[in-house]
Image (spheres, rainbow, N blue to C red):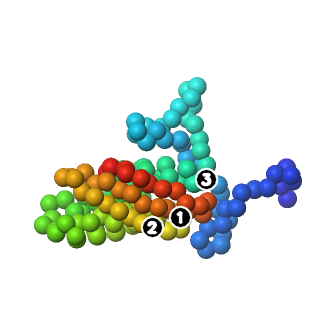
Amino acid sequence: MALFPLIELPQTTGTKGQRMPLFREVAWDFKENRPIWRGGEPVYITGGPAVLVWAWNALHNPRGLHDVFTRDYGLGIQELEGKPYSEEIRRSEAIRYVRQALEVNPYIVQVDAIAVDFSGSVLSLTCQIQTIYGEVEINGWTL
């Protein structure tokens, strides 16, 4: 029974049918690469946009570098550095690493249409993320 019976709780069903709490994250300024603050307090967002912020942070943190995160958190793209792979293999591996970094989140159901482009050591990424809240899009992020 809800405290306010006229207000319905959002659907928060996970991939295995269990109820999951509404995903909440600090709002992020993607251009400045920093959290958004108002009145000395962080601004919080929920749902799909919050999952997108989580994706940003996961893709911008090297896997295994910081002890504060689990071993599954972050992007393992540094494994490609210094390897004599062809351009095709580098792209394929980059796509695999991106998918691997994002799909550890139980709020992310699927990662589709991943396109990567290397310009020197900079990786540009575009993809669609299917979350339990709907689709969010990564468009032209540089990693």
Q: Are marks 2 and 3 in contact (CB under 8 Å)?
A: no
Residue at 31% x, 54% y is 124
Secondary structure, mark 3, is loop
Q: Does any portion of residue 72 appear in the rendered image?
A: no
N-terminal of the pair, mark 1 or mark 3, is 3
Given residues 117 and 57, the one toward you in this image is 117
N-terminal of the pair, mark 2 or mark 1, is 2
Distance from the alpha carbon under mark 2 to that under mark 1: 8 Å
Q: For residue 130, which numbered disc appears in the image?
A: 1
Secondary structure, mark 2, is strand
User: On the image, numbered disc 3 is attached to which residue?
Assistant: 47
Q: Is residue 28 above or below residue 69?
A: above
Distance from the alpha carbon under mark 2 to that under mark 3: 19 Å
Residue at 55% x, 50% y is 50
Q: Nearer the viewer, mark 1 or mark 3?
A: 1
Percent position (x, y) of residue 125? 35, 56
Residue at 48% x, 56% y is 137
Secondary structure, mark 1, is strand
User: On the image, numbered disc 2 is attached to which residue?
Assistant: 112
